[in-house]
Amino acid sequence: MTGFQARRTHQPPGHPTGLAKRLVRATTLAACASLVAGCGVIPGTTGGTGDDPVTVMTWAPEKTAATNKPGMPAMAKAYARWINAGGGINGRELKILTCNDHNETVTAAKCARRAADEDVVAVVGSYSQHGRAFLAPLESAGIPYIGGYGVTDDEFASALSYPVNGGQAALMAGLGEQLAKDCGPVALVRPDSIAGDQLPLLLDSGLRSGGHDRSADQLAAEDATEYGGHAREALRRASAEPGTEGCVVPALGDRTFTFMDSFRRDRADFPDVRTGTVLGSVDQTVIDATGGRSGPYEGAYVTGWYPVENDKRWDRMKEVIREHAFGDNRIDPADPGVQTTWIAYTVLTAAIKEIGDGEVTSQTIRRVLDGGLRVTTGGLTPPLSWRFEDLIASAGFPRLINPEVTFQVVRKGQLVAARRNFVNVEKTLVDAEN
């Protein structure tokens, strides 16, 4: 990747090293061993041989009352059309199965069981809030989970998970670091859900790293139709210290748009405050839809995993969307779910190319990824590798390899980079556990 070397972490004083990393690696190694010994079978024997198609699955919630990510399976389909138009991967056709998990535990598990029944070699570039429900069937079948969205802690604990970003954890930790310098009181509005419960801890760790007090934590229903009371309470808390400009942080996924509608109506009754959020809760499309430079996001701080959408490093993905998505309006190149799916399929392609003429199965894909394959993504992430030495020293996120985030800001209605380079939030993530 441009600007990156293979990661060798030089720890600052007081940062966990040595024993902490050995404990994390030992835990992950034990989990790997249990997958082979615990089920009475050798997992990972699915998949075709020779020039048979390589079958994978991508899932995400669609048409639900909460967060939806229809662009992820749509991007997977477009990627496959592009790859197959060029002769496939090592001459093998890429076949995509999709599944709608409906944001439900039972359906998420059904998607995973279907993946096993259909003999897929990997689940790639997917989103689900129900990590425990879908990971158990995948682990029983030995199917790797490559490039999940990172919305649950479970994705950073399973030995069969190969994340490409730092998940919601890295975003919230990074946002805390970004807000600590410029905000007075910080009010966090987040889902009253299992996935939302970790957000205050991570945001506060980032705030604390900059010498800032903890945020005020407000719980809200993820599928609410209006947030008038929450918006007024957040504004009251953020403006509690006269003479300082506080910040309101809505982290409600798709419902952030609904919250900001209430926020925009009520903000005139309170002193000026700024907003801060993470990609996935807002993108350029949302900023445009809410008024651009005259809307509520002007001046907002935003933390993401990847470069801003207008960065030239996304040009290849945009070209594929133009030529192979056939006008599918579910695919928004600014959506971090779409971007994550692109990167996840880049990893899958690299793994299959590494296998060469050998048999492509879930087991051989895992062997390649565990064996030190180093995947470059054209500068969209640091080089990705899932060796034990690439894991960060976090007991809570033992499979996390990419703690890099980007700081962005809305200026004149456009989401632009606030800092040129990636920011490493590994220490903040580790400190959040203490």
Image (cartoon, helix red, strand yellow):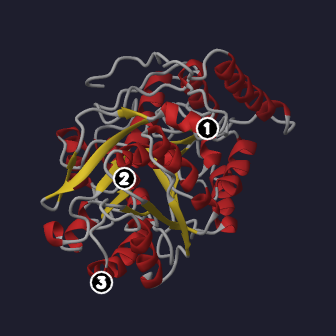
Q: Quadrant of residue 255?
A: bottom left
State the residue lying farthest toward the front.
242
Image side of residue 86 versus residue 199, left or right: left
Q: Under tag 2, what secondary structure?
A: helix
Q: Which residue is mark 2?
A: 336
State the residue lying farthest toward the left.
412
Are the residues at dot 2 and dot 3 in contact (C-beta closer than 8 Å)? no
Position of residue 84 relative to residue 112, above or below, is above
Q: Under tag 3, what secondary structure?
A: helix
Name the one closer to the observer, 426 or 146. 426
Amino acid type assigned to the residue bearing label 2 in the image: Pro
Amino acid type assigned to the residue bearing label 3 in the image: Arg
Q: Label 2 crowding class (10 Å Cα cut-off): few <14, some 14-19, many 20+?
A: many
Are the residues at dot 3 and dot 1 in contact (C-beta closer than 8 Å)? no
Position of residue 276 relative to residue 106, above or below, is above
For marks 3 and 1, the one nearer the N-term is 3
What's the mark number on residue 397? 1
For marks 2 and 1, the one nearer the N-term is 2
